[in-house]
Amino acid sequence: MTTRAWPALPALILLLVFFLFPVVRMLGFSLEGGTFDWYAKALGEGLYLRVFWNTFEIALLVTVFCLLLGYPLGFLMATTTPGWATLGFIFVLLPLWTSVLVRTYAWMVLLGRNGVFNRLLMEAGLTTDPIPLLHNFTGVLIGMVHVLLPYMVLPIYGAVRRIDPAIPAAAAGLGASGGRIFWRIYLPLTLNGIFAGSVLVFVLSLGFFITPALLGGGRVMMIAVLIEQQVREALNWPFAAALSAVLLVATFAIYALAQRFSQPETTR
Amino acid sequence: MRTGKGSGEGSAELLIEGVAKRFGEVAALDHVSLSVAQGELLTILGPSGSGKTTLLKVVAGFETPDAGRVLVGGADITALLPARRDIGMVFQNYALFPHLSVKANVAFPLEMRNIARAEIDRRVGEALAMVELAGYEARLPKQLSGGQQQRVALARAIVFNPRLLLLDEPFGALDRKLRETMQLEVRRLQRRLGLTTIFITHDQEEALVLSDRIAVMNKGTIQQIATTTEIYERPANDFVADFVGESNILHGTVSAPGLVALPDGRKLMVDSEAAPGAKVGLLMRPERFSGGGLNEFSGEIVEAVYLGTSFKLRIACEGGPELLVRQPARGTLPAAGTKITVGIDPEAIHVF
């Protein structure tokens, strides 16, 4: 270790004791008895494969919705006046500083059978029976998109801010309409931001627990929810450890893949 | 304000009429009017904050004026979007599209006009040949030197035969030698294509090299529009005299026809028809002094600098002004403290 790295030592020790050690310990659990039986169960039985598939599907949808909502927001924040940008930041960052638990309960109040949304819809006469928004796929999706949106908005905001304002101005002067400036200039120059935000949201989605557990009401099974059930209810720690290991490897794989395909930084 | 003669060939291609623009309390443009003839290169010269960039943005359509009109070829374009103006512009830092190749950058304005692929290829090839960048089609902007990027920006601005070419301090980032090469190249291209051009700069030397006419701006108004020689030889006021070239500016009162009395009592013979009693400014360029003349100044050298082709001397005159004088560099550089007498003839003094 060079002398310049010494100040990082406390943090390294902390990670070693409280992160790396438990992870290694957990991997040890999964190989209990010296066999790969628990892995065979996790990856071999249709039921559990479905949970993995479900998790990926939700993560993908959450990423897509975050992108569709987050791009316009990040873009506007980066191109509007400082006053509006600050307001945007407050709305994006305030939820980020609020506990996920609090936000998820707030969504339960909004989305329930007798929740705010359903009452509004029924009073407006748009529906006679409450629409099921909670304890299902839709509820989980709404909650997760909300919680993860800042992770999409911020990289996109950064990417748009890095573009020299003279570049879109030059495109306009050369005859490009607003739409063409977007497709030919802004979009290609913000691909890195889109990519970074998407990887972040997708990877965070894979391991999401609180929101799917509460808004899914046990009916939407994601991998983290399954792991928690195995630990708390089935008391099957080796199997939970094997599932965790699979999730960990999948996350690493996606991250490594993302690194491979991320473009080299485009400079001005 | 004095409007020069020699606005030259043809009719007014660009007409700016009473354009005003305020940013809060600051009047960036205070009812500016000017016209640029077909094929002319007009330089807008001024210090930073003089409003020259704002004026260019109004012409390009990136700023909407509070008052006034902009006409190109007789048509009012004041309310037109930038994309509809058909104006080629080279930005200060070029604003090349970093993710597009040289070829795609130059092809961009043609693609926006939905021109056929074969025609685009032909015209991009021509434009790149014109700026001597044939063979660089596939490079990205960041793989080019500053001068090459500049050429790409220029090719991109002229490839679609714009009605006007706007150049916003395009040589600022280049070193001196390259800047001089590019200046001459731009001038050659502009003449060859007959492009009506507005060139923005704060560099008076650059303005003198490039322009047909110069408009000197300060504090949102045009101080003088005239040919390069007229701006240099016969500036309209203190600001122009001081901003363009080195100068000695004195103020006095006409005491008799052809005679100006300075505050210190000294009288100078001048070639002017100003009436007695008029308060006038006198401009004496440093290089117009010689060893003697009808008006003589004696004094002591305060500072002497060797500049290769000339000596630059600062002379404190007895009981009077301090003068900046240039003499051809012959012999040894006079030391500070040396007594010296210099003279200037009446016709070399500009009265304004």
Image: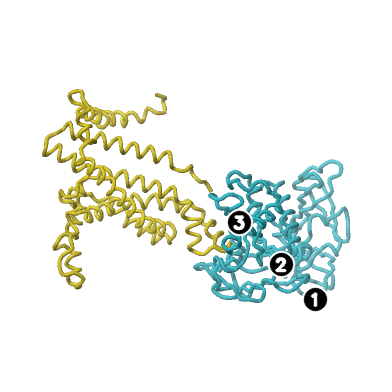
Q: Which x, y percent locates residue B13?
A: 69, 71
Compared with A29, A234 (above or below) is below
> Mark number for residue B237?
2
Instruction: Name the residue carrying label 3.
Output: B107
The label shown at residue B275 is 1
Quadrant assignment, res B229: bottom right
How far apart in space, not on screen, are marks 2 and 1 (Cα)?
A: 18 Å
Q: Nearer the viewer, mark 1 or mark 3?
A: 3
Left or right for A177, reference A1: right
Residue drawn where x is 48% and y is 55% of the image: A186
| 3D distance between C-alphas at marks 1 and 3 | 61 Å
Task: Give the residue drawn at x 85%, y 57%.
Answer: B343
The percent coordinates of residue A1 (x first, y second) are 39, 24
Residue A72 placement: quadrant? bottom left
State the SS at label 1: loop
Chain A colour in the picture: yellow
What type is the residue that disc 1 sits on?
A: Ala
Q: Tell me which numbered mark, 2 or 1, is placed earlier along the sequence.
A: 2
